[in-house]
Image (cartoon, rainbow, N blue to C red):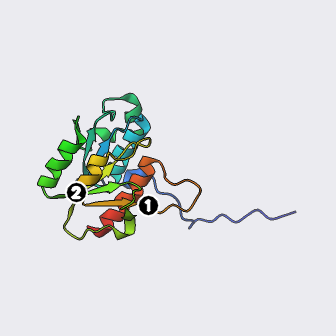
Amino acid sequence: MTSPLPIVTNRKMQTDHSSHQPSTDTYPLCYLATDIGTPSNVGGLFRIADALGVEKIYLTGESLVPPNSKIRKVSRSTEKYVPYEYHSSAVNIAQTLKNKGYRLICLEIASNSVELKDTPISKGNKICLVLGSEKDGVNPELLELADAVVHIPMQGINSSMNVTSACAIATYALLEKI
């Protein structure tokens, strides 16, 4: 007869979410999302922005906007808490943000892009992370306006990743620098 396994009482356990204390602090980083037409991607952007303290999302062009039940489901209702605006022209809002002192950082694989880790920003910079559609990427006019074009080096067979996954990685990396 085998003896029963001992009861371990000092095991590390996942905490429940009731101990989470949300912060109202945000970082000087916003998203400019162009032509993001998939509700799960738009919802994911809101959820990432909420989790990482992004100050605002600018949805432009053909991007879907709240209220939308699919966006709400994926965002876990964070679209109610993360400020956002819709503008038809991504180029116009990009120019407005540049005039307000934001550095435009386009997340795109391009001939002049640098690795994300080498993004030319520093403490105190205000950042606008420009995200394009998965099909067409970032608009060439926005690439021309950009202060930097950055990419995430890919190791696998695909040369790119989902826009929300890439956004999460880029946001975290940029926040480490500002």
On the question of residue 54 being in view, the answer is: no
Q: Which mark is residue 133?
A: none
- Where residue 58 sits: x, y (%)? 25, 43
At 30% from the left and 39% from the top, the residue drawn is 79
- Where residue 95 sits: x, y (%)? 16, 49
**Closer to the N terminus: mark 1 or mark 2?**
2
Which quadrant holds residue 157?
A: bottom right
- Where residue 94 sits: x, y (%)? 20, 48
Give me the C-alpha separation between circle 1 and circle 2.
Answer: 27 Å
Q: Amino acid at mark 1?
A: Ile
Q: Is residue 73 left or right of residue 33?
A: right
Q: Is residue 28 left or right of residue 118?
A: left
Q: Which mark is residue 25?
A: 2
Give the crowd class for mark 1: few <14, some 14-19, many >=20 residues within 10 Å: many
Q: Secondary structure at mark 1?
A: loop
Q: Secondary structure at mark 2?
A: loop
Q: Between 27 and 86, which is closer to the camera in this rendering?
A: 86
Q: Amino acid at mark 2?
A: Asp
Quadrant where the C terminus sits is: bottom left
Q: What residue is shown with label 1?
A: 152
Compared to residue 97, the image places residue 111 above or below, namely below
Query: Residue at the left extreme?
Result: 99
Quadrant where the N terminus sits is: bottom right
At 44% from the left and 61% from the top, the residue drawn is 152
Query: Residue at the front extreme?
Result: 111
Compared to residue 171, the image places residue 46 above or below, namely above
